[in-house]
Amino acid sequence: MTLENHDRPRKRRGSAIGHALAVLSLLCCLSFWLVMAYYRWKGILIKDLVGSPWFLIMCTSLVSALLAARLRSRLCWIAIPVSIFMMIVTM
């Protein structure tokens, strides 16, 4: 058994964790839009996002997308720009 074959399960596990982190990042962004749509449907006007937990949620989204990139997930190339855009929206 060579060293390359021995290292293969670790790469698959890292890739699966990276994929899960990228999906988590996209779910954070999706939850923001679902809540905003719900408030709009109810007729509640949100004037200010300052002081809301959404900025911290979007920071978590960005960190998980960056960790997914570090673990070489293919989905991170979608998750990183979406997370950056959403973090700018909630600032």
Image (cartoon, rainbow, N blue to C red):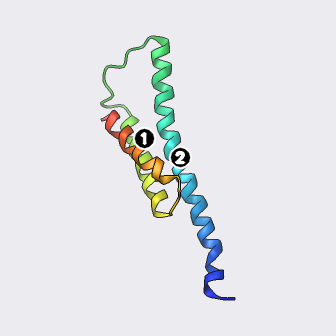
Q: Is residue 86 above or below residue 14?
A: above
Mark earlier in primary sequence (2, 1): 2
Label 2 sits on a secondary structure element that is: helix
Number of callouts in the render?
A: 2
Q: Position of residue 78 (x, y in %)?
A: 47, 48
Q: CA distance from mark 2 to mark 1?
A: 11 Å
Label 1 sits on a secondary structure element that is: helix
Q: Position of residue 89 (x, y in %)?
A: 34, 34
Instruction: Report the side of 83 relative to 75 (left or right).
Output: left
Q: Which mark is residue 19?
A: none
- Residue appearing at x 51%, y 33% in the figure: 31
Amino acid type assigned to the residue bearing label 2 in the image: Leu
Work out which residue is located at the far right of the displayed protein and give it.
1
Instruction: Report the side of 33 relative to 90 (left or right).
Output: right
Q: Nearer the viewer, mark 2 or mark 1?
A: 2
- Residue appearing at x 49%, y 12% in the figure: 42
Q: Position of residue 25 (x, y in %)?
A: 49, 46
Mark 2 crowdedness (10 Å alpha carbons): few <14, some 14-19, many ≥20: some
- Image quadrant where one finds the N terminus: bottom right
Residue indicated by mark 1: 57
Q: Is residue 27 above or below residue 41?
A: below
Amino acid type assigned to the residue bearing label 1 in the image: Ile
Mark 1 crowdedness (10 Å alpha carbons): few <14, some 14-19, many ≥20: some
- Image quadrant where one finds the C terminus: top left
Quarter of the figure with residue 83? top left
Q: Nearer the viewer, residue 26 or 59?
A: 26
Q: Position of residue 75 (x, y in %)?
A: 52, 52
Quarter of the figure with residue 14? bottom right
Work out which residue is located at the far top of the displayed protein and give it.
43
Q: Is residue 39 above or below residue 87?
A: above
Q: Are marks 2 and 1 in contact (CB under 8 Å)?
A: no
Residue indicated by mark 2: 24
